[in-house]
Amino acid sequence: MEKSRIFGLDFLRCLAILIVVIGHGLVLIPSFGGVYEFFRVFDFLGVEFFFVLSGFLIGTIFLKILSADSGGRELINFWKRRWWRTLPNYYLFLIINIIGFGFLKDDFSFDWKYLFFLQNLTSPNEGFFSVSWSLAVEELFYITIPLIYLFFLRIIKVIDVAILLTIFLVIIWSFVVRYNYIINYEATWNEEIRRVALLRLDSLIYGVAGAWLWLKKQDFLKKYKVSFFLIGTLLISFGIFFRNVPEVNDNTLILLLLFPIISLGVTFWLPVLASWKSKSARNGLIEKSVVKISLWSYSLYLVHVPLMEGFRIFILSDSIDNSFFQILVFFIWIFCALILSFFIYRFFEKPFTDLRDRKSNGEWLRAFISDFSLIRSKK
């Protein structure tokens, strides 16, 4: 395991992606409705874990690199590094989804908003490339939050005040627009409130708040990390309870507070997770698996749904009532998703991510061609 990696954060990322994958994949075992009914209580948590973790990691980065003297160059460099990490995989799977939907649906027409992460800016995206809604939330966050923070920092010149203003502004904005949405539309927790990008920026800002506190008060947070973890667990439990209240979609207060409670709870987990360094990572199979799945998580997030739909349409269609066959297909699908995510990470995602450290204009292209030639020669 790389020395720079924090095992606790890898664990959270691994847990998040497994919750998402298993939650989606339960459609492959329809004969076991009881399992689905039990798991659906928790299946929305995976993406919420990702949001807070992204806020924590990205917040740590821009708090370190952006200062009162920073200008457009530093900000653009921050964005470029994020885009080298996120855009190649996104556009690869956008093309894959276009091909798949074009092949399976005669009436399919592509919405240009997906090119610019605008598909769920003000309303939830429907059907096509369904998992991209969370990526649009994160891209909106990457663009807007550093801008707001740098704006305050250039005016006030004090990091603590600038980040506090940014956090409060985003939280207040999110509550105001969410309340407006609730009273003006027939909003449901799982569609509009959960998946509309403009309503979800506060889900990541709690992670930024956690990053700021971690950089400033690390000793204090480590001292009381168990207490914070228990508080976080209690908050997440409240969130799970509210999500399963039958009248959840008719209660304005629950719709307003459901996701902030979850995000705040995960933020309270961060001191424990950020302090957790595995001592047996070199030899432990479980630890190695956690780190690997964490590394592959972005590719796994993107590949598991189109692969699942392929299994559901072409394999399960004639044998849907066979319980044993459904379970077998479910585990084969997970295995195939993991293998594909490894190959995508190793031969596509990681090479692009590595290119962001190339400085000169043409160096990244020469390096990519060189790496590609090396891979072919090994074959």
Image (cartoon, rainbow, N blue to C red):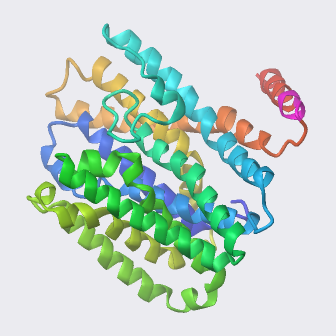
Q: Residue at x 30, y 57 (%)?
A: 178
Magenta segment boundaries in residue numbering: 361-366
In this view, the residue in front, 125 or 163, is: 163
Most extreme residue toward the front is: 155
- Residue 81 x %, y %: 72, 47
Q: Is residue 197 visible?
A: yes
Q: Residue at x 9, y 59 (%)?
A: 247
- Residue 292 x %, y %: 59, 51
In this view, the residue in front, 1 or 113, is: 113
- Residue 228 x %, y %: 43, 84
Residue 295 is left or right of residue 270, and the answer is right
* Magenta stretch holds residue 363: yes
Instruction: Name the quarter where the N terminus is drawn.
Output: bottom right
Quadrant of the image occupied by residue 128: top left
Q: Is residue 286 visible?
A: no
In this view, the residue in front, 332 or 86, is: 86
Numbered disc total: 0
Quadrant of the image occupied by residue 10: bottom right
Instruction: Name the quarter where the C terminus is drawn.
Output: top right
Q: Residue at x 63, y 56 (%)?
A: 147
- Residue 77 x %, y %: 76, 49
Check the image and report above or below for 86 versus 180: above
* Magenta stretch holds residue 343: no
Q: Main secondary structure of the magenta part?
A: helix
Check the image and report above or below for 181 versus 127: below
